[in-house]
Image: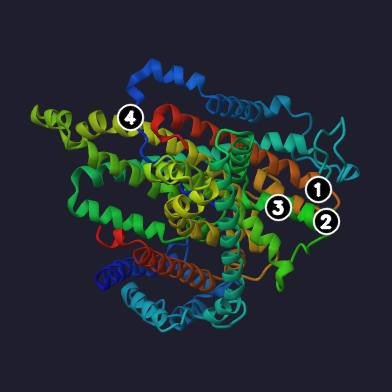
């Protein structure tokens, strides 16, 4: 077990280094002189350019700049945002709870809806319910999160006036964005749970359980469910990336402060230290979350450790 | 890609072990004609493509010219989908937008396939350090959740039609690398590859003439489903104001414009969104159908 964890940790290191190189290079890959970015829209005199170049260390060799960037990043210094002149990390940490809340709530929605509908469709295999659930799932997979968000707002905020359309704070402001964000993941999950449930229900041990006279609901609850849900748990982990990415759009639509919206605003205002910081932070968090997910599988399912 | 794309599945996962049924030619074609979802999906998609292609002929109004007197008009016989803030006919704009949104899906998938398949072939066939470098590169690209990689590329290059295609294309590369490399690894030990090598065929020739045909079936399925997520990612970026800018009609930016009037003129956002959904739905149906046809074992 320890060997597996250490191995996975070591594998994550080159990826983290790669992410830091990419986010560092972003500034230098932008067409034109990077100094112009720090000057904003103002015209740049040669003297001012030299001054800025020195101030931001752009006059040093690229490798030296990277080592400096990476060593500061490791210590939690992601630079200072151009517009607000605040440390980038502070800006991120300030909105991070909002994003975490939204993503986890969406994961919950996806899990409950997806697993519930998937099991229902599998048990009702071949009936109208099965067909209906699968049709809705196909529709869910095909609806972009920005469209489902707008439809939910239109219906629940404007037509029925049940829930507020925008803002953050309180459960009533979390339900709509989390549902919008979780919908297509739940559709993916429902399809997967249905097919793995159908497979498990065809296994001999399920037939045995039925043969000894166990009622259908108990066969599903006690014997089939546990095995059918293993792929679903894996898929939930994989969907986390999609949800984190989708949060970018959802936060913008529902006017919720969050890391995704911070990144979009930073790109729109060409605030590059903030862009670099959010990209580096989001990717690093994603790699670490994946690491935790992988390790927790190994705890749940011993077969993975020995692969 | 996926966008996820956005909250879509990474297409590679949905293809799984697609078999190489391609060479069974006529029977595959018959199965395709019997697959309801492939036919419906393909038919609707064809219709959408034709509508976009013939937008200049079909669309009743100019998609760009404004007319303030008609601002935010309800759907009517004159304006089937109503008019937007500037009095432009939404139906005409939705048709014209297909000329932007559909190529974004097509070209970015082409970019992803071109680079992904080349890298996958090289990595799988030659192995060694080349394989190690390619796979680390894939790991790195996969470290960016969902739309974030495309977002970062747009941040560097700036938003335009070409850059949007490049950004969405690059973020889909990992899927194609993995599926190609996997197939190459399983095929390259087979006798026919060995035989080709014995008679002195060169590496590139073996890869292109003997190995690539085996990747084709899963690749077609993956690229089809990938097109759906590419269209979603492309329109999401435009929706966020990072892609195609108004007044050029594009489904994502039309939806963003409509968002402001959602409460009182919901049609401005409803129809462009429905266009995206219908397009993506038809592509997904086609992709699912193709998977059933090309690999009957993988029926979900």
Residue in the picture at 43% in, 56% down:
A234
Give the chain letter at badge 1.
B
Q: Residue furthest right?
A: B69
- Please indicate whether residue A290 sits to the left or right of residue A267 in the image: left
Picture layout, residue B26 above or below residue B96? above
How many C-alpha atoms fall within 10 Å of the one at disc 1: few (<14), some, or many (≥20)? some
Q: Could you tell me how far apart the alpha carbons at marks 1 and 3 are, in whole angstroms?
A: 12 Å
Residue in the picture at 43% in, 46% down:
A209
Labels 1 and 3 within one chain = yes
Q: Could you tell me how far apart the alpha carbons at marks 2 and 1 are, in whole angstroms?
A: 10 Å
Mark sitting earlier along the chain (3/4): 4
Q: Which-is-in-front pick, marks 2 and 3?
A: 2
Measuring from the top left, give residue B20's x and y in whole percent.
Answer: 33, 29
Instruction: State the residue position of label 1.
Output: B266
Instruction: State the residue position of label 4.
Output: B20
Q: Which-is-in-front pick, marks 1 and 3?
A: 1
Q: Dot 2 lies on which element? A: helix
Give the chain letter at badge 2.
A
Q: Could you tell me how far apart the alpha carbons at marks 2 and 4 are, in whole angstroms?
A: 51 Å
Picture layout, residue B256 above or below residue B61? below
Instruction: State the residue position of label 2.
Output: A158
Labels 3 and 4 within one chain = yes
State yes or no: discs 2 and 1 in contact (Cβ < 8 Å): yes
Q: Nearer the viewer, residue A257 or B243?
A: A257
Which image quarter is the C terminus of chain A in? bottom left
Q: Residue B256 shows which numbered tag?
A: 3
Which image quarter is the N terminus of chain A in? bottom left
How many C-alpha atoms fall within 10 Å of the one at disc 2: few (<14), some, or many (≥20)? some
Q: Dot 1 lies on which element? A: loop
- Please indicate whether residue B297 sits to the left or right of residue A254 in the image: left
Mark sitting earlier along the chain (1/4): 4
């Amino acid at each position: 077990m320890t060997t597996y964890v250490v191995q996975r940790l070591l594998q994550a290191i080159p990826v983290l280094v790669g992410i830091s190189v990419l986010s560092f290079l972003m500034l230098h890959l932008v067409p034109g002189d990077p100094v112009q970015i720090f000057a904003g829209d103002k015209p740049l005199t040669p003297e001012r350019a030299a001054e800025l170049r020195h101030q931001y260390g752009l006059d040093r060799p690229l490798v030296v700049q990277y080592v400096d960037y990476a060593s500061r990043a490791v210590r939690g210094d992601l630079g200072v945002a151009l517009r607000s002149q605040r440390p980038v990390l502070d800006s991120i940490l300030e909105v991070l709870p909002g994003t975490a809340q939204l993503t986890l709530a969406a994961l919950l929605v996806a899990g409950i809806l997806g697993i519930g509908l998937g099991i229902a469709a599998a048990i009702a295999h071949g009936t109208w319910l099965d067909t209906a659930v699968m049709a809705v799932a196909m529709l869910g997979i095909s609806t972009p999160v920005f469209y489902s968000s707008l439809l939910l707002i239109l219906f629940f905020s404007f037509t029925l006036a049940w829930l507020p359309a925008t803002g953050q704070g309180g459960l009533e402001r979390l339900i709509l964005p989390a549902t919008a964000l979780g919908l297509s993941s739940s559709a993916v999950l429902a399809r997967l749970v249905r097919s793995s449930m159908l497979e498990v229900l065809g296994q001999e041990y399920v037939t045995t359980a039925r043969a000894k006279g166990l009622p259908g609901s108990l066969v599903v609850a006690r014997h089939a469910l546990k095995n059918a849900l293993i792929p679903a748990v894996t898929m939930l982990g994989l969907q986390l990336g999609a949800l984190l990415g989708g949060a970018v759009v959802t936060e913008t639509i529902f006017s919720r402060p969050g890391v995704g919206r911070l990144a979009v605003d930073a790109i729109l205002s060409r605030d590059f230290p903030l862009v670099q910081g959010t990209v580096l932070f989001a990717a690093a968090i994603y790699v670490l979350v994946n690491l935790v997910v992988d390790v927790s599988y190994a705890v749940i399912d011993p077969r993975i450790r020995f692969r | 890609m996926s966008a996820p794309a956005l909250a879509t599945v990474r297409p590679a996962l949905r293809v799984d072990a697609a078999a190489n049924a391609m060479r069974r030619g006529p029977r595959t074609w018959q199965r395709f004609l019997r697959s309801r979802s492939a036919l419906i999906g393909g038919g609707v998609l064809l219709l959408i493509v034709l509508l976009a292609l013939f937008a200049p002929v079909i669309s009743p109004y100019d998609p760009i010219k404004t007319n303030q007197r008609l601002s935010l008009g309800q759907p009517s016989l004159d304006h089937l989908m109503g008019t937007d803030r500037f009095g432009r006919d939404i139906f005409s704009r939705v048709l014209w937008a297909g000329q932007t949104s559909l190529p974004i899906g097509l070209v970015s998938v082409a970019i992803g396939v071109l680079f992904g398949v080349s890298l996958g072939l090289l990595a799988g066939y030659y192995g060694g350090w080349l394989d190690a470098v390619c796979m680390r590169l894939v790991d790195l690209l996969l470290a960016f959740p969902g739309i974030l990689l495309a977002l970062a590329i747009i941040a560097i290059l700036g938003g335009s039609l070409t850059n949007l295609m490049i950004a969405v294309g690059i973020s889909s590369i990992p899927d194609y690398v993995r599926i190609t490399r996997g197939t190459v690894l399983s095929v390259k030990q087979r006798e026919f590859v060995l035989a080709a090598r014995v008679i002195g065929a060169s590496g590139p020739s073996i890869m292109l003439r003997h190995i690539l045909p085996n990747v084709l079936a899963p690749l077609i399925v993956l690229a089809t489903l990938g097109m759906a997520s590419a269209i979603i990612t492309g329109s999401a970026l435009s929706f966020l104001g990072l892609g195609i800018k108004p007044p050029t009609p594009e489904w994502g930016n039309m939806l963003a414009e409509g968002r402001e009037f959602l409460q009182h003129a919901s049609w401005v956002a409803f129809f462009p969104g429905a266009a995206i959904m219908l397009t993506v739905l038809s592509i997904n149906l086609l992709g699912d159908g193709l998977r059933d046809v090309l690999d009957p074992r993988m029926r979900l």
